[in-house]
Every structure is written in structure tokens, then in C-alpha cells.
Amino acid sequence: MNIPLILPHFLDRAVTLFGEKEAVHCEGRTITYKQLNGRVNQLSNGLRDLGIVKGDRVAYLAGNSLEMLEGFYGVFQLGAIMVPLNIRLKPEDYLFILNHSEAKVLFVDQDFYSLIRLIIPDFKTVEHIIVHYKDSETNAIDYDDWLTSYSASVFDRADIDENDVCSLLYTSGTTGNPKGVMLTHRNNYLHALSTMHHLNVKESDVYLHVLPMFHVNGWGAPFYYTANGATHICSRKSTPASIFKALQDYRVTILHMAPTVLNALLQYHDAHQPVVEQDVRVVIAGSAPPPAFITRVEEELGWKFIQVYGMTESTPLSLISTIHSQLTDLPKAQQTVLKSKAGYPMIGSDVRVLGANGREVEHDGAEVGEVAVRGHGVMKGYWKNEEATKEALQEGWLFTGDMGTVDEYGYINIVDRKKDVIISGGENISSIEVEGVLYEHPAVLEAAVIAVPHEKWGETPHAYIVLRENMEATEEEFIAFSRERLAHFKAVTSVTFVEELPKTASGKIQKVQLRDTYWEAQGKSGRLVN
């Protein structure tokens, strides 16, 4: 008899093998895997009492906490579907997602209750709102009181199939309403097996949740760290100071984050020089960092840098940039360049870069095509959106919208998003390449490049730059700096200095907001579309 690949089995394994081991540290609380399992059973019993059955949607608007972590397993035991909500959306976005997903129960942190309070009368399907860390003034069900009223004994699970949808993740597109990505138990289970191998996850690991758990299930971290009996460190709010304190207090060995968050840690380290004695692996996804950035992480922090690539629709991770054993004799500088790329396919993922005619691009690091993925991680589709599903999934391939090249070693390099490629005088320019050069300037803390209209060339690169504290530079200096290091047609032609760049909750820079800001500054309406 075949054993279905369902996610509750990961917690079962942890309880069997590591029951008395510390599973979670959160807000001053420490619980073992056996105790975590008891809380999960209480949650499942409570949800069943509220009428939740297989296939129902249960939404979470929460930070990285014990409550969010146990939510995954408590919801899954019923065969219900988890709908994690981005904590940085607007009330109208929450209203759309909750109504579109037809969620029946909403769990929300007290800190975020104000975001949904005024839209509650417009909920069409939400029947119960339960508040984590509730204060005395909020008129809602208190999570702790509610949870402890239910039994922690073994829960009689629903009949779950590995192809059942387990999570519904809404992506924040640049136009129109968010789309709900349907991921199955099988998607997440096989993704976990592949990822735990490539990241060398082991029971002695201590994982700090920096990447939000709502962000494509925290890249699956609640699953593969649990399966291996690793210890979770949860904090509802993360700052550079709190991250370094957790690294010291709990001897954290691995953490995931966006490049902008890691950049903030580097700045904090420069200013405060905190001492971290244990070996640390830091896993990064997003725009390819300049090699100098990786060198700083590995030499100044002493951490192992691991670049990965993926998207919500592929569960998400499908590429990793660790160095093949047969390439360890390459010069260190060349290895660092390889580490900065999106990487090569992880086990179970078939990733190719396809040209306009559908053939694979040459492995020369020059020919550009669109990155396409197929394999165990590719989503089931978009919730109640067949048209968008058909557009994204073509003959089993997920077309990512990312443009890339493949080098002689098979490492894929993302050169830009389709919509972010700058076309100047008929030449394609990678905004990521230009940003990488700007980061080499000692005064640059953060940089983002977009296309802006140009009378002669059609469009040219425009940079938004955040300067390091107590440092100065001029627009002319950056234009000259980029012209010295790039072909002149790739160099920035103008610069806007800002205090900060707009980011998503996971730390990704939102270029669409920068485009809107540019147009508003020009006194025009509309949005620049490439």
C-alpha cells in the first residue's frame, strides 16, 4: 500500500523521533515537539467544532509566531486549506482575498486587527474571527482561551490525498487583483525533500524565521525543518538588532531572507560588530547580488552564502547556486560569480531557458531567453481563474516571466524580469546588471533601476539610490561611475536620491511603485510599461 505524501506526516516524524526536544522558541515561550503536537490537535479540534471540514479555507493574518507555525499543521489535519495573508496589504486587498477564497475562519494577530476591523461587515463568508495576543478592548475570540478549551489528544484526521490543495497563496501582481496559487500536499512534500537535501538540513539545525511564513509558506520552512526535528525560533517582528540577538542567544545555524534584509544586517554589523561564534548558513532569493556583496557576507560575517531561485507558482524553490565539487579548483573570484547566479536545477525540477522559438538558449552566458520550469513543485493552478492558469502553464511548463542566460557550467543567471528589461535604442539592458554596478560605489546603501522615457533612445536607465549614512554623492558622479564600468548605452542617465526604497513584506524592492513615483513627479498619469 502506498503512503500518501501529506504534510502532517512531517510533524508525526518529529514527535516520534524528537518528542522531548525543544521545537519552538517564541515570545519567551519554549515548547517541545510533543507539546507542539498537542497544540496542533487542540487547534484541529477547535476548527472542527467551528464546522470546518475538508476543503474549507482558513485564513491567517499573522507574524512569524508559534501560532502561525502550528496553524499549518492544525489546518492540514482537517484536509482544510491554509490561506496565509501578506501583512503589508491594504484593507481592500484583504477584503478581496477573503471573499475570493471564501475563507470561513480568520486568525489574526492583535497588531493587525486594525487592518480588518472596518471591513468586517463586508465579509461574505468569514464566520469566525479569532485573535492572537488579544487585548482587552478587542471584541473577538481570544485565541489562547479558545485553544485551551479543546483536547490535545490524538486527532482523527480527515482522509487526505496528496493531490489535495493544502495552501492558497495570493500573489501581489502589478495590475489587477491578486491571483490565488493552489499548492498541493504533494507539491510541498516533494519540495521539502529536495530542499532539505540541497540546504543540508539536519536535526542539530536552529532555524530563525526571518522570511515571513506567509510568503509561499516561508519557502516551505515549516515543513522541512520540522521533518528533521530542527528547532524553530519565531519572532513576530524582526530587526537587525533582534536577528543578531537571536543568533547569539539561540546559536542559530540557518536563516532565509531577501537581499535587502541581509544588506541591513551588514550595515548593523559594520556599526556594532556583534560576535556570532557558530557556523551560519544564509539563504537568499531575489535579484542576483553583486559578487562583492557575497564576499562581504562570507568574509566579514563569516557566513556561508547560498543563493536560490523560485516563485510562488513553483512551491517555490527550483534553482540553487552552491558550487559543484568539480568546480572547487576554479579561482575564488570565479566561484563567487557562480554563487551570485540563480544556479542549477534542484532535484525534481527541470528548469530551462527558452528562446523565442521555444528552443533552449546556448550555454554561452550571452543568449537570453525566458526561464521555464516543470516538475513536482509546479502549482495546480490559480484559484477560480482558468484563463490565468492557461496563460502561465503551457504543455506542463510554467513560464516565469524571468529572462536569463545559461553559462558553460549550466548555471542560470537571471538578467531581468520581462517587464523590467530596458530597451534603449533597440538594445536590451538588464536593470539587475546596472544595479550591480551601482552597488560597487562606496556611497550606495540600496539601488534600484527602472526605464524612463527618452526623446532620442526611447527609454534609458534611471536609478533610485539610498546613500549610506554620512556619505554624499551627486547625480553626475553616478552617471560617470556607471559609464566607466558599463557600455555607455547601459549607463544611468539620471538619478533620484531617496531615504528608502519601497519593499514587500519579504524585503523585495517594488519597482512598480518606483515607476508610479516617477510618473507622478513628472506630473503625468499612467504607468511605464516595458
Image (cartoon, rainbow, N blue to C red):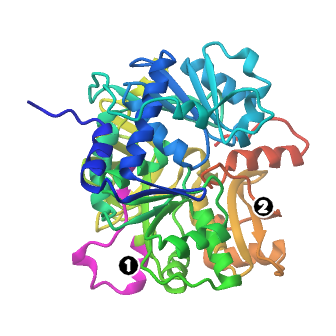
Residue range of the region highlighted in magenta in the rendering: 316-338
Q: Secondary structure at mark 2?
A: loop
What x and y, as percent, mark residue 3?
16, 34
Q: Amino acid at mark 1?
A: Gln
- Does the CB distance between marks 1 and 2 fall below 8 Å? no
Q: Is residue 385 above or below residue 411?
A: above
What x and y, as percent, mark residue 126?
61, 18
What x and y, as percent, mark residue 239?
67, 64
Q: Amino acid at mark 2?
A: Glu
Q: Residue at x 69, y 42 (%)?
A: 88
On screen, residue 249 versus residue 398, left or right, reads right
Tell which of 368 and 10 is nearer to you: 10
Mark 1, residue position: 335
On screen, residue 380 versus residue 176, left or right, reads left
Mark 2, residue position: 500
| Residue 354 appears in the figure | no
